[in-house]
């Protein structure tokens, strides 16, 4: 599949979108990648740190290709071993020995992408990527690789970019050998079977239909329309039925593969706990990939037409400034654009634009990048009324251009420039040396194909070459307008077809558009920038420039990166070690008491023994210490990852359910707090510290940073968000007038924009994130209700609401990482008043309001929604949800065993065989303490009502498949599920999130994994069958949630209005089902949100 690759939040919705991989799993919170999108500005950037990675021992390498002289630059905390090989067919290989991981992974990168495909078959490269998963001569069975992933508890995916295609998978290590062999045959003997080609074309078309109707793809597609027609960047690169159903497509696929896939332009990365020697034996099969000695096609010059103004119809009012700059892949150590980006984001440019009410959000990133060019983009979200004045885009451009001019003047001070570079270089070194966890295997494979093997890990980070002239070259390019494209998005633009022969100012004020792309279903207009506009943007404004302030010295760069020793800080005393066997028989109160006493009854050791016992404690301790039972304060000492960092989390649960007014106030205050944090904490946020703040039905704050300064960091965060501060320092100053302050106005507008983004999500995302929770969880507020409430909320009411709900609440906190018990206790006491009134006693509620979840017992409901947000949406989405009941350890173990196989078979049948849609998955999903199972499909081949019936048929089919499963196959399935649960956290944040899930939910089932593993060992195939039939066949409690796109209703069904649509639904309700009725509902009560590992 293709994914949009964007760093930063080019589109806010990308941060919460799903990615459906090739086994049908859905993963949340990952950014999309796309065929034309480039690699982003990486986190930060350091000096070289050469570390030998040669493994000792005798082993005869592959003939003449073993290279022990390559030393991979790796972080100083990285325990992994690396070996670089070049096989006899010139395939580049990096092997990674990770002794701590139960999971193995591999990726192959090919230096060929959509720019290599023939003009007559646009999308062929993407289609080829799909087809390589379908079958090979050695493994011809369709779905073989997907089944292997399922049985091995793994997943796979791929993406097609402009000039490379990347394939990758993850699987339990005991299945790695077979997976690598099947993976190698993707590239040795792919089949391109005609029947499979005809089927998979529908999947590509479904992907096209999903992407072309989504908001976040509009800018990407607009760039293709604005590219030089003679450059491959202008090509339609996704593919659809129209272009891929042409005669000869099978031969075209074979020819594309033959002409563009060769071992000498490919790179392979493999990571597992197997030894380097063992992995070297496993990858020998890849030497069979044919070496055609291809030279990657070169594309020089700039592909896009710039010096333009552009307008396009979209749901969000925004201005995008895009610069087409010189390529930078040959200057990896200088990082001039990263330095400039830091300076643009850390002066007062953002503040000025917001204070003048020109923008409410400002984000910058690398948008597209290839060897000879890079597109740098600034995305600005506008207030609701901004585009009434068409010149706002030019005014924003003028302000930014003047800031860049002033930036150039600041940097002429050699001392300042050198200090800024030295500071950024130091930050980048620290962030590389103390990088959390391994890099993605797909990124490693791609870097191996772009850079030398020594820099495969560090190429995106190292900033160790100071080049003043290069910095000023990029600043000079950013000051120009002939390489600038200004795009304005607005929902009020309308296509008229009239010729727009106007000057720039009239063009920008005009709400008309004169162009439409049928293939992208995109309406837009463009005009060349005139000399008047160019002069307006670039003319120096001395008074304006005097208002700008430059970034100052960063005070959050850590000096002390040493790890704490409990033996030293606790005078040779250590907390008691708690085992899962001790926790298993205890109720909640018993667990709390045990973990409280573990930190109070310290055990003293002789000086010569303490360090050894401390290491054992670290290695064998999986559970946190309860510091304060009354205030629910927790701590865990953790330096196993060798990270001099601390993770802190606070949760505040309200004792009473919020009213719609209170909920809306809390959400507005969330945006105000976010803005204040970003304004006040730019330095630490640019240094590797992170903060996440969520305010809704509860408040949750997570922060991460270097232990030396993290306490100061969290204090500043608390100062930004505490509503009980003195008036002199509060975020909102209430002066008794009726006029609303600018930050309050921006916050309300940001909330409105975020809600509207929800309704622009893809249908399958809306079904999971919006409609299912609102139906099942009592008291959920519909976004439409919040939109109606926003105008009614005043600043005074907002502050009053916040203070009221905080007065009776329950707080929890966790500190984990490089800090001892005494510091954790002091720190926790400070955090207790983070969002509370220090001057009054807050009633610390010990009981939360129970969570009510709709009971579906004995129901067979159908919920239908006509989604009218996109008139051209031809897709439909269906989510069939089957309720299981309250979480039990037995059910949880059964679900973990069953899900991979059930999901894989659903994907193979519903997507690969029936081609119902590109998005197909099965997943067990938890709503509070209630477990359930869902089947999700989005496509346009069949109507949702019909897909519902096909899912039911599959359920019966899988029952037969499950009963025929051989004993050995079942044991492999069970073993893979156990290995997956045994996987230890790979980073401090991962460990913290795992523990925090139990603490914040009030569940405290810290031993859940160990208990589940023990239960799994005794589960039989017969028990799994009984569990499956009880949920899906015999005692079903079901709701079928069906969303119909507007195009599916008006074009596919030919229905003219809601009355006709309602009549169609009534006539097609399945036998035994009924429409969802929100009257006389019954609910299941949950005291806690059960954590879901």
Image (spheres, rainbow, N blue to C red):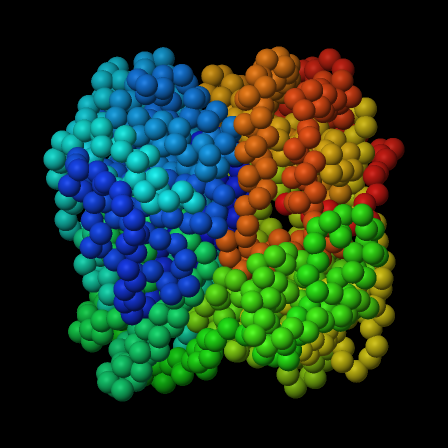
Q: Name the residue rendered at 46%, 75% in the picture.
A: 561
Relative placement, left or right, of 977 versus 326 is right
Q: Tell me if residue 864 comes above or below residue 329 in the rendering.
A: above
| Percent of width and height locating residue 270 | 35, 42
| Percent of width and height locating residue 75 | 37, 63
Q: Quadrant of residue 460?
A: bottom left
| Percent of width and height locating residue 184 | 31, 30
Which of the two residues, 582 or 829, is positioned nearer the viewer here?
582
Q: Tell me if residue 504 comes above or below residue 225 in the rendering.
A: below
Q: Quadrant of residue 1033?
A: top right
Residue 136 visible here: yes
Q: Tell me if residue 773 comes above or below residue 786 in the rendering.
A: above
Relative placement, left or right, of 453 versus 962 is left
Which of the two residues, 858 or 805, is positioned nearer the viewer here?
858
Q: Name the residue rendered at 23%, 41% in the picture.
A: 61
Residue 875 visible here: no
Q: Name the residue rendered at 55%, 50% in the picture.
A: 984
Which of the two residues, 239 or 388, is positioned nearer the viewer here?
239
| Percent of width and height locating residue 478 | 26, 66
Relative placement, left or right, of 134 versus 566 is left
Q: Name the residue rendered at 50%, 61% in the picture.
A: 641
Relative placement, left or right, of 1039 versus 173 is right
Q: Tell me if residue 459 comes above or below residue 211 in the rendering.
A: below
Quadrant in which the N terminus appears: top left
**Number of numbered discs on residues:** 0
Which of the two residues, 570 or 848, is positioned nearer the viewer here?
570
Quadrant in which the C terminus appears: top right
């Amino acid at each position: 599949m293709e994914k949009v690759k964007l760093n930063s939040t080019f589109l806010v919705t990308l941060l919460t979108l799903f990615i459906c991989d090739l086994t049908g799993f859905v993963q949340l919170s990952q950014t999309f990648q796309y065929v034309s999108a480039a690699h982003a500005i990486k986190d930060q950037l350091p000096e070289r740190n050469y570390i030998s990675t040669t493994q000792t021992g005798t082993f005869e390498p592959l003939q003449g290709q073993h290279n022990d002289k390559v030393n991979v630059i790796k972080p100083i905390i990285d325990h992994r071993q690396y070996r670089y090989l070049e096989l006899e067919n010139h395939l580049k290989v990096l092997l990674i020995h990770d002794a701590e991981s139960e999971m193995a992974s591999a990726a192959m990168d090919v230096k060929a992408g959509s720019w290599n495909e023939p003009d007559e078959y646009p999308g062929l490269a993407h289609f080829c990527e799909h087809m390589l998963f379908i079958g090979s001569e050695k493994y011809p069975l369709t779905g073989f690789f997907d089944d292997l992933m399922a049985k091995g508890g793994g997943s796979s995916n791929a993406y097609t970019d402009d000039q490379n295609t990347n394939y990758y998978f993850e699987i339990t290590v005991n299945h790695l050998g077979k997976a690598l062999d099947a993976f190698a045959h993707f590239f040795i003997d792919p089949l391109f079977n005609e029947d499979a080609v005809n089927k998979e074309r529908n999947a590509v078309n479904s992907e096209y239909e999903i992407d072309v109707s989504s908001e976040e793809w509009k800018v990407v597609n607009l760039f293709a329309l604005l590219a030089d027609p003679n450059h491959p960047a202008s090509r339609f690169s996704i593919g659809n039925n129209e272009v891929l159903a042409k005669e000869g497509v099978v031969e075209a696929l074979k020819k594309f593969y033959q002409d563009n896939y060769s071992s000498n332009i490919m790179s392979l990365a493999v990571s597992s706990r197997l030894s380097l020697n063992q992995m070297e034996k496993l990858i020998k099969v890849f030497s069979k990939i044919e070496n055609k000695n291809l030279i990657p096609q070169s594309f020089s010059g700039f592909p896009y037409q710039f010096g333009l103004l552009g307008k396009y119809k979209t749901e969000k009012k925004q201005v995008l400034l895009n610069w087409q700059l010189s390529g930078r892949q040959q200057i990896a150590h200088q990082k001039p654009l990263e330095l400039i980006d830091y300076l643009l984001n850390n002066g007062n440019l953002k503040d000025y634009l917001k204070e003048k009410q020109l923008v409410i959000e400002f984000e910058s990133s690398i948008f597209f990048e290839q060897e000879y060019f890079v597109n740098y983009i600034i995305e600005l979200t506008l207030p609701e009324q901004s585009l009434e004045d068409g010149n706002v885009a030019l005014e924003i451009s003028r302000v930014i251009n003047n800031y860049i001019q002033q930036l150039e003047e600041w940097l002429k001070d050699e001392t300042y420039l050198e200090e800024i570079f030295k500071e950024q270089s130091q930050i980048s070194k620290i962030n590389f040396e103390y990088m959390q966890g391994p890099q993605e295997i797909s990124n490693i494979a791609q870097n191996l194909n772009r850079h030398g093997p020594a820099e495969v890990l560090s190429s995106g980070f190292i900033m160790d070459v100071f080049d003043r002239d290069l910095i000023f070259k990029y600043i000079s390019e950013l000051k120009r307008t002939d390489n600038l494209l200004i795009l304005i998005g607005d929902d009020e633009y309308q296509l008229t077809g009239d010729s727009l022969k106007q000057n720039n100012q009239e063009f920008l004020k005009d709400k008309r558009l004169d162009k439409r792309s049928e293939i992208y279903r995109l309406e837009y207009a463009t005009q060349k920038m005139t000399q008047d506009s160019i002069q307006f943007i670039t003319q120096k404004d001395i008074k304006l420039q005097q208002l700008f302030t430059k970034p100052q010295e960063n005070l959050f760069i850590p000096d002390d990166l040493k790890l704490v020793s409990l033996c030293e800080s606790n005078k040779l005393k250590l907390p008691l070690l708690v085992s899962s066997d001790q926790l298993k028989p205890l109720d909640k109160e018993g667990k709390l008491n045990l973990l409280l006493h573990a930190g109070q009854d310290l055990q003293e050791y002789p000086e010569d023994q303490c360090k050894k016992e401390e290491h054992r404690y670290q290695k064998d301790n999986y559970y946190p210490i309860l510091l304060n039972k009354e205030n629910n304060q927790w701590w865990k000492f953790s330096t196993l990852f060798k990270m001099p960092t601390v993770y802190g989390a606070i949760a505040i649960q309200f004792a009473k359910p919020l009213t719609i007014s209170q909920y809306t106030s809390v959400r507005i205050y969330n945006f105000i707090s976010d803005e204040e944090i970003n304004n006040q904490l730019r330095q630490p946020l640019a240094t590797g510290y992170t903060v996440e703040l969520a305010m809704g039905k509860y408040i949750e704050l997570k922060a991460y940073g270097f232990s030396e300064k993290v306490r100061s960091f969290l204090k500043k965060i608390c100062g930004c968000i505490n509503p009980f501060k003195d008036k002199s320092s509060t975020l909102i100053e209430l002066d008794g007038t009726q006029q609303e302050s600018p930050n309050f106005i921006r916050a309300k507008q940001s909330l409105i924009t975020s809600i509207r983004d929800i309704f622009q999500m893809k249908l399958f995302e809306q079904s999971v994130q919006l409609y299912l929770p609102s139906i099942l969880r009592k008291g959920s507020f519909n976004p439409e209700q919040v939109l109606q409430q926003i105008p009614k909320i005043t600043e005074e009411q907002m502050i009053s609401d916040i203070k009221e709900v905080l007065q009776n609440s329950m707080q929890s906190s966790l500190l984990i990482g490089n800090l001892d018990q005494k510091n954790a206790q002091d720190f926790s006491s400070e955090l207790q008043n983070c969002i509370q009134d220090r001057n009054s006693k807050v009633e610390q509620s010990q009981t939360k309001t129970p969570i009510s979840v709709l009971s579906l017992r004995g129901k067979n409901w159908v919920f239908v929604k006509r989604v009218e947000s996109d008139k051209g949406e031809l897709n439909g989405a269906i989510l069939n949800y089957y309720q299981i009941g309250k979480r039990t350890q037995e059910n949880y173990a059964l679900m973990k065993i069953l899900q991979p196989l059930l999901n894989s078979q659903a994907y193979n049948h519903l997507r690969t065989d029936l081609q119902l849609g590109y998005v197909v998955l099965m997943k067990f999903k938890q709503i509070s303490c209630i477990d359930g199972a869902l089947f999700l499909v989005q496509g346009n081949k069949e109507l949702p009502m019909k897909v519902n019936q096909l899912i039911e048929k599959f359920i019966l089919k899988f029952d037969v498949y499950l009963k025929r499963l051989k004993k050995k196959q079942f044991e492999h399935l069970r073993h893979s599920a156990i290995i997956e649960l045994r996987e230890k956290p790979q980073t401090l944040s991962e460990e913290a999130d795992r523990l925090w899930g139990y603490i914040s939910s009030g569940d405290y089932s810290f031993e859940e994994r160990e208990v589940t593993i023990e239960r799994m060992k005794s589960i039989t195939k017969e028990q799994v069958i009984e569990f499956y039939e009880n949920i899906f066949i015999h005692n079903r409690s079901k709701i079928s949630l069906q969303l119909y796109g507007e195009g599916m209703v008006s074009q596919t069904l030919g229905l003219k209005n809601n009355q006709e649509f309602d009549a169609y639904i009534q006539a097609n309700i399945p036998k035994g089902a009924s429409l969802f009725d929100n009257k006389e509902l019954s609910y299941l009560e949950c005291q806690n949100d059960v954590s879901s590992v």
